[in-house]
Amino acid sequence: MNFIRRKSELPGINIAPLVDIIFLLLIFFMISSNFIKPMLKMELPKAIHEEKKLEKVDIVITADSNHDIYINKSLVKLEDLKNALVDRMAAIGKYDVIFSGDNKIPYELFVQILDISKEAGSTSFSVEHEKRK
């Protein structure tokens, strides 16, 4: 007696849903990542009053505990800070600067950065800090 056998399909993996998930994860991480602030571990000074943050910040000057200075994510020497600020301000047409510095930096470095940013033409200079608990 001959039995009729169905043709068996070879098992396979459909990768279309996997590709969709990968693209969704890529889009999620691109949207949720922060492109403005440098990824530096810093201890910001504490203050009693907390100011509201600007909605969109284009120029952030950061000074870490090693006295390295960054404009957004670009490392800049103190001597080149004025030229870099002038170029960045002219490129984006915005003259607001936010300073974010580690609490271990000397006050002299803060004043130098403030003077340089005013010389470069900044109209607003804000200092980022954390609120005391």
Image: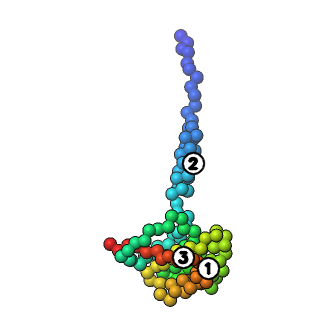
Q: Position of residue 97 (x, y in %)?
A: 55, 75
Looking at the image, the residue that sits furthest to the front is 123
- What amino acid type should be assigned to the residue bearing mark 1? Gly
Q: Name the side, left or right, on which 125 lies relative to 119.
A: left
Label 3 Cα crowd, 10 Å radius (few <14 / some 14-19 / many 20+): few
The image quadrant where one finds the C terminus is: bottom left
Q: Which residue is mark 2?
A: 23
Rendering quarter of residue 77: bottom right
Q: How much space separates mark 2 and mark 3, taking CA atoms?
A: 40 Å
Instruction: Tell me which numbered mark, 1 or 2, is placed earlier along the sequence.
Output: 2
- Name which residue lies at 57% across and 48% down: 23
Q: Position of residue 7 (x, y in %)?
A: 58, 23
Label 2 Cα crowd, 10 Å radius (few <14 / some 14-19 / many 20+): few
- Name which residue lies at 56% across and 38% down: 13
> Which mark identifies residue 124?
3
- What amino acid type should be assigned to the residue bearing mark 3? Ser
Q: Position of residue 27 (x, y in %)?
A: 55, 52
Looking at the image, the residue that sits furthest to the top is 1
Q: How much space separates mark 1 and mark 2, taking CA atoms?
A: 42 Å
Q: Name the side, left or right, on which 93 lies relative to 25.
A: right
**Dots 1, 2 in contact, CB < 8 A:** no
Q: Is residue 73 visible?
A: no
Q: Position of residue 46 (x, y in %)?
A: 39, 77
Q: Which residue is mark 1?
A: 121
Q: Secondary structure at mark 1?
A: loop
Q: Is residue 82 visible?
A: yes
- What amino acid type should be assigned to the residue bearing mark 2? Phe
Q: Name the side, left or right, on which 9 lies relative to 42.
A: right
| Foreground: disc 1 or disc 2 | 1
- Name which residue lies at 48% across and 81% down: 65
- Name which residue lies at 38% across and 74% down: 49
